[in-house]
Image: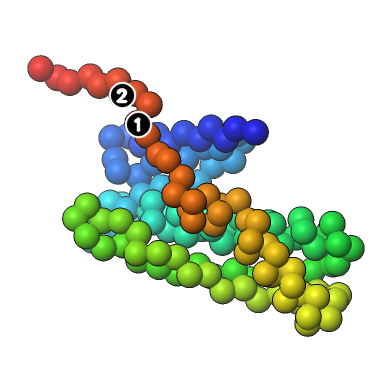
Amino acid sequence: MGYEVEVRNVDGQVTALGWAGPYTLVVDRPREQGGGGRGLSGGQLLHLAVAGCVSNDLFREAAARGITLRRVVVTADGGFAGDPAVSTGIVYDVEVEGDADDETLSALVRHVDAIAEIPGSLRAGTAVALGGARVRGTG
């Protein structure tokens, strides 16, 4: 399964819209970093990808085990350092409430931590490569 996404800036501004199929979001930089402050930064999107994946996988894996989850909260935190800045790592915390005992829910969380696609991809060092570039200057 492939996931093609696209980001396009809006009206010559730093602010951009991101698309993944029929879904959109706003991508931007904070005002103090030269952006419009209207959307999520790349670093926030990286952390959100981890949290969103873990949340989705908790529901998927719970359903496969006949467990109904009532509440899932995933908080991902981390930073960036260096020049150029790179991630200093991501730590996430999970809160789960459902119709199983604590031991079963804890086992579910551990299982999802081991199989969640985005955290697993980052842990394995997913390759990222520039596929091409089309440029058009004024001179």
Residue 25, position in %: x, y?
50, 46
Q: What quarter of the picture does the N terminus occupy?
A: top right
- Image height of 124 relative to 133, above or below: below
Q: Residues within 10 Å of mark 2 (few under 14, many from 20)?
A: few
Where residue 38 appears, as percent x and y from the top left, is 38, 53
Residue 80: quadrant of the picture: bottom left
- Looking at this view, name the residue that lies furthest to the bottom: 102
Q: Residue at x 59, y 40 (%)?
A: 23
Residue, far front: 124
Display colour scheme: rainbow
Crowding around mark 1 (Cα neighbors within 10 Å: few <14, some 14 to 19, many 20+) is few
Label 2 element class: loop
Q: Is residue 23 left or right of residue 91?
A: right
Q: Residue at x 60, y 32 (%)?
A: 2
Instruction: Out of 39 and 77, give the one closest to the viewer.
Output: 77
Q: Which mark is residue 133?
A: 2
Residue 77, given in percent of the width and then of the height, sits at 45, 69
Between the residue at mark 1 and the residue at mark 2, the CA separation in whole angstroms equals 8 Å
Farthest right residue in view? 66
Badge 1 marks a residue whose secondary structure is: loop
Considering depth in this image, is 138 or 123 the residue closer to the camera? 123
> Do we see residue 1 in this rendering?
yes
Foreground mark, 1 or 2, reads: 1
Amino acid beneath label 2: Ala
What amino acid is found at the position of numbered circle 1 in the picture? Leu
Q: Which residue is mark 1?
A: 130
Q: Are marks 1 and 2 in contact (CB under 8 Å)?
A: yes
Quadrant in the picture for residue 15: top left
Report the disc number at residue 84.
none
Q: Nearer the viewer, residue 76 or 111?
A: 111
